[in-house]
Amino acid sequence: MLDKAITELNKGNYTGASELVDIAYIDNYEYIEDPLKELDKDLMEETEVMIREDFASAIEDKKPLDEINTLHTNIESNLEMAEKLFKQ
């Protein structure tokens, strides 16, 4: 969903991108929060803030795409770390 949000941003669709971020958080990230918290509380909290506050706000505020892409990359990195923790 976050990748789709970036696609929408590249089309200039900030509203659509914002909606996709909300869906990604509510329909996906919320389900892994508690299990991730047990494995790495700091990673869980950091990723939550990055998605729900930083990324969403950057889109809402129509920050430069470079800045939004950097946030996206950082979120993806955190999600990859979470995935590795779940596979252990």
Image (cartoon, rainbow, N blue to C red):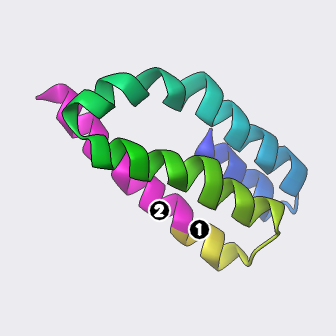
Out of 71 and 57, give the one closest to the viewer: 57
Residue 31 image offset from top left, x and y in percent: 47, 21
Query: Crowding near pointer 2: few (<14 within 10 Å), some, many (20+)?
Result: few
Task: Name the dominant secondary structure of the magenta segment.
Answer: helix
Q: Residue at x 70, y 54 (%)?
A: 56
Tell me: 17 left or right of 87. right
| The residue stretch that appears in magenta | 71-88
Q: Quadrant of the C terminus?
A: top left
Residue 7 image offset from top left, x and y in percent: 71, 53
Tell me: 57 left or right of 27. right
Q: Is residue 57 magenta?
A: no
Q: Quadrant of residue 21?
A: top right
Residue 65 image offset from top left, x and y in percent: 70, 73
Whether pointer 1 and pointer 2 mark residues with C-beta atoms closer than 8 Å, the reply is yes
Tell me: 15 left or right of 20. right
Q: Residue at x 41, y 53 (%)?
A: 46
Q: Mark 1 belongs to which amino acid?
A: Asn
Q: Quadrant of residue 38?
A: top left
Q: Which residue is mark 2?
A: 73
Q: Is residue 34 above or below residue 77?
A: above
Total numbered badges shown on the rendered structure:
2
Give the secondary structure at mark 2: helix
Residue 82 image offset from top left, x and y in percent: 29, 39
Q: Mark 2 belongs to which amino acid?
A: Thr
Tag on residue 69?
1
Out of 79 and 35, give the one closest to the viewer: 35
Q: Residue at x 59, y 68 (%)?
A: 69
Q: Is residue 77 magenta?
A: yes
Q: CA distance from mark 1 to mark 2?
A: 6 Å
Q: Residue at x 61, y 23 (%)?
A: 27
